[in-house]
Image (spheres, grey):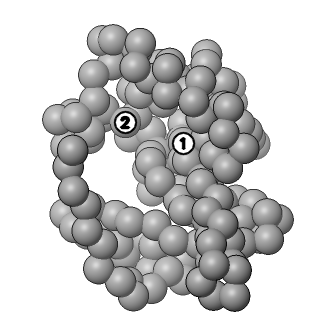
Amino acid sequence: MGDLEIRAAVADDVPAIVAMLADDRLGAQRESPDDLTPYLAAMDRLAADPNQLLVVAVLDGRTVGTLQLTFIPGLSRRGATRALVEGVHIHADQRGNGLGTQLIEWAIEESRRQNCQLVQLTSDNSRTDAHRFYKRLGFAASHTGFKLQL
């Protein structure tokens, strides 16, 4: 494997990111790579918010991974800031080669650099392979998450 670069995403990365989001069983039901308009609008909102960091993992000039890191200031835990990891996706032909581990480890280190005291994430109940992956990286399934579709 060549050198992996993890950097902030830019608008030109949106097509590759959306393709990865849509390239699995769950994403195929909720993503629409045919129309990038809503994704580009979301990219503008993300870029304008200092608590949001959308990154891409680039390997040999090709976008092969992405995740979003959100920094959440709070009062609990003595005023702790939390990092929320969302939208973790690795290109299908790159899964299983350690790239996901590198991306999550980067997110943890960036969270430390931002003085976060906790890194949290959710994973769909059906993604049992992902659950094993996160547990192997030291995450604990300590809470039950709830979502309300609007």
Amino acid under label 2? Leu
Residue 15, horizontal then vertical, whole percent: 47, 19
Determine whether, in the image, residue 132 is placed left or right of residue 101: left
Amino acid under label 1? Thr
Label number found at residue 21:
2
Residue 95, horizontal then vertical, whole percent: 44, 50
Q: Is residue 96 depicted above or below 34 in this figure?
A: below
Tag 1: Cα neighbours inside 10 Å, few (<14), some, or many (≥20)?
A: many
Determine whether, in the image, residue 98 is placed left or right of residue 146: right
Q: Is residue 120 depicted above or below 114 in this figure?
A: below
Q: In which quarter of the image is residue 106?
A: bottom right
Q: Quadrant of residue 141?
A: bottom left
Residue at the location (33% across, 11% down)?
35
Residue at the location (64% across, 59% down)?
71
Name the quadrant of the N terminus.
top right
Confirm or deny contact between disc 1 and disc 2 (CB under 8 A).
yes
Residue 12, horizontal then vertical, whole percent: 61, 16
Residue at the location (61% across, 41% down)?
54
Label number found at residue 66:
1
Q: Which of marks 1 and 2 is nearer the N terminus?
A: 2
Tag 2: Cα neighbours inside 10 Å, few (<14), some, or many (≥20)?
A: many
Q: Quadrant of residue 124?
A: bottom left
- Please state which of residues 96 and 8 is positioned toward the viewer in this rendering: 8
Determine whether, in the image, residue 21 is placed left or right of residue 42: left
Name the quadrant of the C terminus.
top left
Using the numbered discs, state the Cα–Cα distance from disc 1 to disc 2 in whole angstroms: 9 Å
**Mark 2 secondary-structure assignment:** helix
- Please state which of residues 77 and 58 is positioned toward the viewer in this rendering: 77
Query: Is residue 109 among what the camera can see?
Result: no
